[in-house]
Structures are given as C-alpha cells and as structure tokens.
Amino acid sequence: MNYTNLLVELLVIGICSMLWLIPIGQQILNKDMIHVIAINDFQTIIALPALLYFMGMIMNFISDFIFGFMDEYFAKEFGGKKNIQEIRTIIFVKYEKAVDYLQQRRSIVRIYRANTLNFLVTTVILFLNVGNVISWFTCSHGYLITINFLIIVICFSAYVNSLKGYFMFISKLGKMQ
C-alpha cells in the first residue's frame, strides 16, 4: 500500500475518533485551556493532522485487537487464517495487479472496523452526556443515540461483508494457481 493511501485511511479513522475525544477533552480540560488551543491557532493547525493520524493508528490497533476474533472466525470458512496468510504472501509475490485490489479491500476493512468501535464509543459518550455533548444538538438524546446505533450497525455490517469479500478473493485466487 502506498503511503498516501495509508495516511488517508488513518486520518479518516482519526477524524471519526474526534467524535468522542472532543467531549472527553472538554470534560477534562477547563474552559480557559480550550480557548488557548483554538482551531485558528497556527500551532494547533499544524498539530491537528499529527493528532488525527496518531489517533487513527491507535484506534486501528485497538479495533484490530478487539475484533481480531472476527478475522479468525471468518477465515475458517476459507481454510483458516494461516492459509489466508500463506496465499496472500504468494499473491503479493506473483500478482502485482491483484495486490492493489487486496490493499484497497483491506483498507476498507480497517476503516469500517475502526469506525464501528469509534461510533460505539461515541454512543456511550452520548448516553452518558460526557462534556454536556447533548447540548450541541437540537434533537433529542434518544434520537442521537438511535442514529449512532444505526451507524454502528451499518459500519459493522460493511466490515463483516468487506472482510468476507477480502478472504473470498484471496481464497479464489489461491485456487487458481
């Protein structure tokens, strides 16, 4: 995977993690501190992409750890995780065009997986009203939680389908050799 794709992937995950980090930050930091790190401050603008990238890396790692059993479970359908890894290694060595597709699919899997976790944490933040986050919206508390729950279901479903498609592609390409 080229660096630009990885950068964008981690930034997308990091941006979604801000949905729950900002209310927590507001709860922890006092109002004077929040004004010091205003978004129009040049140093904040420089530091923000680094923070988003870093949060993307952390959320990717945590979600990989939490949802790792899903990889194992669905890989069994295609000969097991070890089999998938062996075939993927052969694909990376032999089929240059397939590598791009595989990397794109895996990137999609990571984004959906991490954002399933991001929106799950965001739902908890909304439920607990951390940082008085509910006051930011004009709709009801229950409505926000319901919308977030639907986003979790969509992200999780997309994660599972993308993961299965990824494994299926590897498995079918492995049978062709």
Image (spheres, helix red, strand yellow):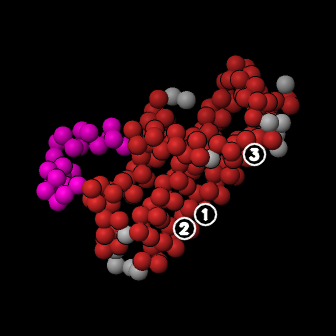
Quadrant of residue 55 within the rendered picture: top left
Q: Residue at label 1?
A: 153
Image quarter of the C terminus: top right
Location of residue 117 with respect to 1 vertically, above or below: below
Q: Disc number at residue 73?
A: 3
The amino acid type, in three-letter code, at marker 3 is Tyr
- Cα gap from disc 2 to disc 1, whole angstroms: 6 Å
Label 2–label 1 contact, CB within 8 A? yes
User: Secondary structure beneath disc 1?
Assistant: helix
Residue at label 2? 149
Q: Point out which mark residue 57 bears.
A: none
* Range shown magenta: 29-53
- The quarter of the image holding the N terminus is top right
Q: Main secondary structure of the magenta part?
A: helix
Residue 77 position within the rendered picture, expressed as x and y whole percent measured from the top left: 82, 44
The single residue placed furthest to the top in the displayed view is: 93
Which residue shows up at 37% across the image and 69% down it? 129
Q: Give the crowd class for mark 2: few <14, some 14-19, many >=20 residues within 10 Å.
A: some
Q: Amino acid at mark 1?
A: Val
**Front in this rendered view, residue 97 or 90:** 90
Asked if residue 27 lies left or right of residue 77, the reply is left
